[in-house]
Image (cartoon, grey):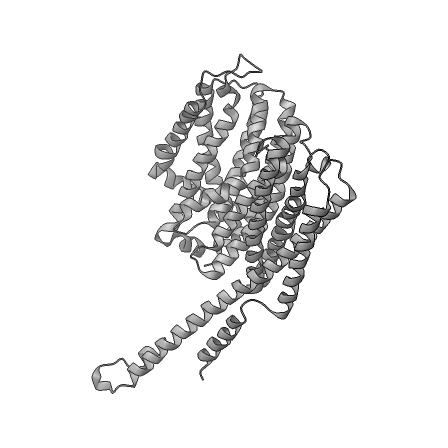
Amino acid sequence: MLNDALLLAAKDLRVERRSRVLTGQVLPFGLIVLILFGFGISPDRRVVEAPDRTVLEQVAPGLFWLAVLLSALLALGRSFAIEAVDGNLDALKLTGLDPAGVFLGKALAIWLELLAIELLLGVGSLALYGATITHPLLLLVTVLAATTSIAAAGTLYAALASGLRVRDTLVPLLVLPVLAPVLLGATLATEAALFGPAGDGWPWAGLISTFAVLYLGAGMVSFGVLLEET
Amino acid sequence: MTATEESATSLEQTVAGATSSRFSQVFGTLTATMLAVFLLFALVFSPPDVSQRDAVRLFYIHVPSAIVALYLAFGITFVASIMYLRKGTDFWDLLAGSSAEIGVLFCAFMLGTGMLWGKPTWGVYWQWDPRLTSTAISFVLFAGYLAIRRLDLDPTVRSRRAAVLGIIGFLNVIVVRQSVQWWRGLHQGQTLDLVDSQLSGMHYFSFFLGLVSMTMVFGWLLLHRFRVAWLETQADAATLQTALAERQAEAADYTARPPDTGGPTTTETEGI
């Protein structure tokens, strides 16, 4: 199963490396979202309770995760668009790979792509919104757990909408409400990692870790049903 | 009379009776009576609340519709989805779909009455109350479920995907509710509990009537929605059979002609 997963993840990443959609389209999209957030929230406005901080810096964690989520939608759509053409999905079924392995492979590729996106957007957020990290360990755990959650739940729901003409509009509708708790938890945990105290953030990091484990399990169990269908 | 004509006639007979039966007529009358009694208690008999005054009357219909949508309707979808994946019969699939549809309706009703209630109670329509917020997210979640059900796909594929979504979606509703509750709890202490005013026995009795009548309305709607869905699948099957029979008749006509007209041989058309 793990071998199947690695095989499939390597395939997806090879496609990305050659087509350069991730670096050429998804990453610039995330950056422009970060910049536009700055337009929406005037950069000079200061927080009333903490006048040394701008509003933009205060809400940076939420904006960062929103930008990640929106970029993730593009990456997810892309991940299943490459399977939809030329009867690739049928070919995938014919390979006899373990469905749970297929799920883990797709999720793993998305996970690595998301980490690349988050690295760039994270540096971008720190530079554009002027935030500083005070609790790196909490931030690291939050990022890993939230990325796993987005990759696992996203892969599962994108598969539900795969092979359809309306996929592009359906995936966001399905994925965004499902990931609402992750956005909430990741934002609050990141807030704690930036402004402290860290104790406020750990329960939320725990919540998204649980979410990640649940969706990894759900995906591995149900992917067989979704793959064998047609 | 051929088999196709027979099934078409039986379908027409079913349609002629619409979706009502003796049971649903009696049940519908009971539901309407119950609703009338409920409205009488909710609007006339029960006194205005000390602090909320007449706004308290929304509570009788707002909270029951939330309970019916989130627990009863989506709960039925959850169980029926599991049963569909186990048994694979149309019954469970249609039950899951019908229940989710009415659940979304009740969800929208809950959000609407909740906002109307928020205005006189809080002074604003939206207060980021944990229950309202999580219901709004659940509403969109199940709207996505209904979108999957309407897709132009092979029926079995569609039903199976919907079943997976129905199961995970319901579990996700619980996660959403817990996390939103936790979020609001941390930020502003306990939010204003709407049920917290000094309610008398009459208020609770009206609320209880509301719960019973909303559950009955749900049951009645579910019964009819399920029958409509069932008739739709019957109609689809009948249309397909009629079309098949027509094509077969055409083919038989064609092959019956003398061979010198250049028609295909029997073996070529047998596969139709």
In the shown orientation, is residue B34 left or right of residue A140?
right
- In percent of width and height, residue B249 lies at 35, 80
Q: In the displayed structure, would residue A63 be above or below residue A19? A: above
Residue at the extreme top of the image, as rendered:
A52
Determine if residue A5 is in view.
no
Q: In the displayed structure, would residue B272 be above or below residue B228? A: below
A117 and B240: which one is in front? B240
Residue at the extreme front of the image, as rendered:
B44
- Which residue is painted at 65% across and 46% down in the image? B61
- In percent of width and height, residue B210 lies at 68, 50
Count of numbered circles in the view: 0
- In percent of width and height, residue B257 lies at 26, 86
Residue at the extreme bottom of the image, as rendered:
B258
Residue at the extreme right of the image, as rendered:
B201
- Which residue is painted at 47% across and 29% down in the image? A118
Q: In the displayed structure, would residue A112 be above or below residue B81? A: above
A36 and A48: which one is in front? A48
In the shown orientation, is residue B246 left or right of residue B48?
left
Q: Within the image, what quadrant is residue A24 found in?
A: top left
Determine if residue A37 is in view.
yes
B132 and A165: which one is in front? B132
Look at the image and tell me in which quarter the N terminus of chain B lies: bottom left
Look at the image and tell me in which quarter the C terminus of chain B lies: bottom left
Q: In the displayed structure, would residue A114 be above or below residue B230? A: above
Q: Within the image, what quadrant is residue B123 found in?
A: top right
- In percent of width and height, residue B83 lies at 61, 59
- Which residue is painted at 51% across and 67% down in the image? B231
